[in-house]
Image: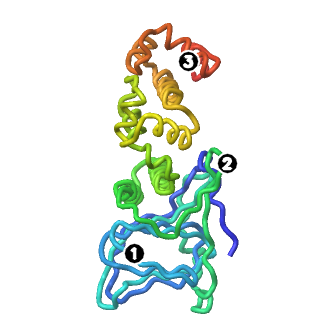
Amino acid sequence: MQAQSAGSFQLWSPTVNYAGRTVSEPGYRWGPRLIPDHHLIYLLSGVAELRLGNRAFELRAGDIGLYGRDTPMTLRSAAPSAAFSYYSIHFNWENPSAIPDHPSAKMRYCDEAELDREPAPLFVTLDDGQRLALPFVARAPQLEPFISQVVDDYLQQSFGYELVLRGRMCLLLAELIRHLREEREPEARRKVLPALELMREHPDRSWHVSELASACGYQPAYFAELFKEALGATPKAYMMEQRIRLAKQLLLVGEPIDAISDRLGFGSPPYFHRSFKDATGLTPSEFRMGGR
């Protein structure tokens, strides 16, 4: 079946159409059915079988299932005598309106014969133009707090909940994409992750290559080659890129320029001014004014 695009990651404006928590009865089955939107399932307890077209997947607590419209599905307990519980979120990736449109009216139950076809794979276009395939099933227990917040806000439906749900869903989907990208990191990038974490946690420190190499368990020369292969930049250039990125964020929230210089380890305001202008073509003050 032809792949379905989830759109461009940076342009997402998702709408939550339904969110809830379900506890199954032993032996109960949902489907087979076709949905008009997209569906994210997060298993809370038990073991379930998610069938998408002619493919079957086992879900355990901490697993997610994800599929879209025109993919026949069934969800049932993996054992006839056992129950399971799960979170369920129906949503659209992009929608001008944040108002939920419950999928039940457009949902269609289908016959078993339709389960013989291939499920429609999903992909998202990232900011660098690359396509990231979205798996039908993934292990992602760290997403549970984000999912539970979406469910709680949908069920409470407090004033402005539609916009809150859009924001919550943006956070959830961003965390999902981040998780999937990290899982598929090139081998070279995985090898230098300890160094990247050090630089991310301590952007004010001028790290020596030998220190970063030691954190990864490599000799400095080999580490430098590996880092350039993984990131496309030397450790020094990468550190400067990250400092400039953080400086932009701090400038836009009103942090004093001298404080930013000190906080990010530039050493002096003049050096910060010069480095920032070399990287962006603007002085810190000009960048801040342009963001207002």
Structural distance between the alpha carbons of marks 3 and 2: 27 Å
Residue 235: percent from the left, percent from the top?
49, 31
Lower sequence index among marks 3 and 2: 2
- Rendered position, 141 above or below 24: above
Determine which of the numbered discs, if any, sits on residue 124 in the image: none
Displayed quadrant of residue 44: bottom left
Q: Determine if residue 194 is in view.
A: yes
Secondary structure, mark 3, is helix
- The front one of 190 and 284 is 190
Crowding near the residue tagged with mark 3, few <14, some 14–19, many ≥20 C-alpha atoms within 10 Å: many
Which amino acid does the dot numbered 2 rest on?
Gly
**Would you name the residue on which mark 2 appears?**
129
**Would you name the residue on which mark 1 appears?**
59
**Would you name the residue on which mark 3 appears?**
276
Residue 241: percent from the left, percent from the top?
53, 28
Displayed quadrant of residue 262: top left
Structural distance between the alpha carbons of marks 1 and 3: 49 Å
Image position of 44 (left or right of 282): left
Secondary structure, mark 2, is loop
Colour scheme in the image? rainbow
